[in-house]
Image (spheres, rainbow, N blue to C red):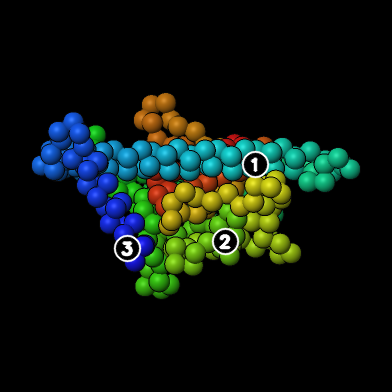
Amino acid sequence: MKTLFNKVTKMKRLFNRIRNNKGNSLAEFAVTAAMMATLATTAAPRFSGVGDAGKANQTKSNLDKIGGMVNQFFMNTSAPYSTTNRFGEGQGRVPGQAKYDVQVGGYSNLEDLMIDLTPVYSEDGSVQTEASYSRWTAYSGASGAGHPGPKWRSVFGTNVVDANYLGGVTNESLGTQFAHDEFKAYLSKDEGTIKSPYRQGHYVFAVIPGGTKYYYDEVDGSLKTRQCNDCGPIMVIADAYNPSKYHTIKSFN
């Protein structure tokens, strides 16, 4: 009974505070509450936009970090093996490659890869057709012919990715180990796997083999190639959430 009395007393105090001694009526309170609700509704899309921008910036930062790991890997493998450089091989390569001139993934040349990542623009500059690999989409084996997902390999291993969002991406085997083992060797013990801020996102890569020099023709702007034994590989790293928008290119060409 005492508890009920206390609750009633608190309700009376709350009612009096709403009315308060300055003369604010319940009607005025209702108007104020309605205004606050309107402001909250108006602000919601803006906060959502801030969240989207934050995710975009985060995945770009992650891609830069992974790219830095690849740079370090190439530098280490370029140098001879020593007690201070156990990654030394005397010939630079990138994670996933057995040698600098080995293809990793489904692209033998840079042009085909960039076609999958580049949208078609109309004359006014707007996107007419989205790039083939612009959005994460499910992959269902033989029925997914033409799907770009299987052309890419997982940076940190498919075992750390939700199977529902792999989209055909697989691991790259190097015989005794996998490409993701070489990536993980460059992670600090404290940070762990670098994860995409997007639910459907995860990091993927493809490698264009070295031995070919890529350059743009100054006359027609087309992409040209020539043999170059000293030219290293090109790795493209992307967030599978939207590879067309979120990717970075590491060229040792």
Report the front residue among 213 and 5: 5
Give the residue number, with chain letter if any, for mark 2.
160
- Within-10-Å neighbours for mark 2: few <14, some 14–19, many 20+: few
- Within-10-Å neighbours for mark 1: few <14, some 14–19, many 20+: many
N-terminal-most mark, 1 or 3: 3
Quadrant of the image occupied by residue 17: top left
Q: Amino acid at mark 1?
A: Met
Is residue 90 depicted above or below 95 in this figure? above
Of circles 1 and 2, which is in front? 2
Q: CA distance from mark 1 to mark 3?
A: 65 Å
N-terminal-most mark, 1 or 2: 1
Give the residue number, with chain letter if any, for mark 3.
4
Would residue 112 be seen by someone viewing this image from the given angle? no
Callout 1: SS: helix
Quadrant of the image occupied by residue 231: top right
Task: Give coordinates of residue 35: x percent, y percent.
Answer: 17, 38
Give the residue number, with chain letter if any, for mark 1.
69
Callout 3: SS: helix
